[in-house]
Image (spheres, rainbow, N blue to C red):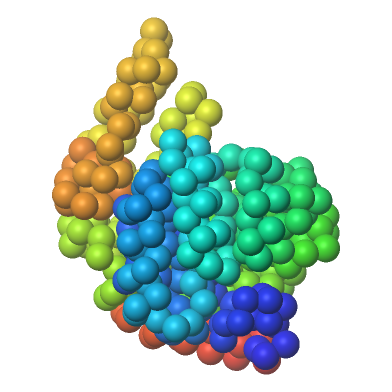
Amino acid sequence: MENNEICKLLGIKYPVFQGGMAWIADAELAAAVSNAGGLGIIAAMNSNGEQLREQITKAKELTGKPFGVNLMLMSPFIDEAVDVVCKEGVKVVTTGAGNPAKYMEKLLGAGVKVICVVASVALAVMVERMGASAVVAEGCESGGHVGDTTTMALVPQVVDAVNIPVIAAGGIADARGMAAAFMLGAKGIQMGTRFLTAKECNVHANYKEKVLKAKDRDTIVTGKSLGHPVRALKNRMTREFTEKENTPGTTPDELEKMGAGALRRAAIEGDVKYGSCMCGQIAGLVNSEDTCKEIVEGICSGAYALLGI
């Protein structure tokens, strides 16, 4: 797809982004995806500047291909993260969990291409005006923090509303999903859950096994009452959280305390009972542990064949 807008914009072979999954998307996974021809993305999450710099340095050692950083705008270290991205010459960032307006001038001034993850048409239009190079339209089928609109409904509406390229995300894990995204007007795709089971992914084996065994109805969204809902695999933690969330009199502080550190417990410590195993609804299609190269090339070749490209 040498004429693909996203590939030309970023200098990548395939229009496939790897999601910036907190505690999961490290330098090794990002480099593996980039080496496979896609865009690997390091999750800055709540890392301080030095921690993020270490990951960027490691990625540079592992790949000479373009890679990006996902900036979580709610991070207490976001100012440090933006400084590091600019000083280290990172060429592209994706942004999530907030409005990037405060940082756009600095990022654009440093030559960084800013691609914003959006869950609504309004936010897509807003970030285009700010100078975003593209947007990731992410439907509620995705894992982690989700919006309200499905990918099938969101992507074409965003495509119609903006003049910059749109990357589709949420519920995409194979060639059929990629082909469907292109038919909706997207120029690329972003996948998180599919890369969770990649051989190069360093997520705890317990987490990876739970994803591989998951079926179509094995995810649940919690935290709607807090204003930042999260999709994860069902387990004891999500059941207890749901019960608490639906109990009259439960305070937001109580719920926040229950969720604090839950993703780290699952991804790093392997606690898949009381940890948060963030995962998309597409988990039922993710049933093999492949290399990033096999994932990227397999999905793209299959999609191109379906589309007659």
Res 129 seen here: yes
Residue 248, picture quadrant: top left
Question: In front here: 276 or 46?
Answer: 46
Residue at the extreme top of the image, as rendered: 249
The quadrant of the image that shows the N terminus is bottom right
Q: Position of residue 208 (x, y in %)?
A: 25, 62
Residue sitting at x 41%, y 18%: 252
Q: Position of residue 234 (x, y in %)?
A: 31, 43
Residue 166, picture quadrant: bottom right
| 304 sits left or right of 158 in the view | left
In the rendered picture of this protein, how many numbered marks are placed on residues?
0
Q: Position of residue 88 (x, y in %)?
A: 48, 65
Residue sitting at x 60%, y 53%: 117
Residue 170 against residue 308 in the figure, above or below: above
Question: In front here: 68 or 251?
Answer: 68
Residue 128 against residue 290 in the figure, above or below: above
Residue 62 against residue 258 in the figure, above or below: below
| 291 sits left or right of 272 in the view | right
Residue sitting at x 33%, y 61%: 54
Residue sitting at x 82%, y 55%: 161
The quadrant of the image that shows the C terminus is bottom right
Res 219 seen here: no
| 191 sits left or right of 155 in the view | left
Question: In front here: 227 or 28?
Answer: 28
Q: Position of residue 114 (x, y in %)?
A: 64, 59
Question: In front here: 272 or 264?
Answer: 264
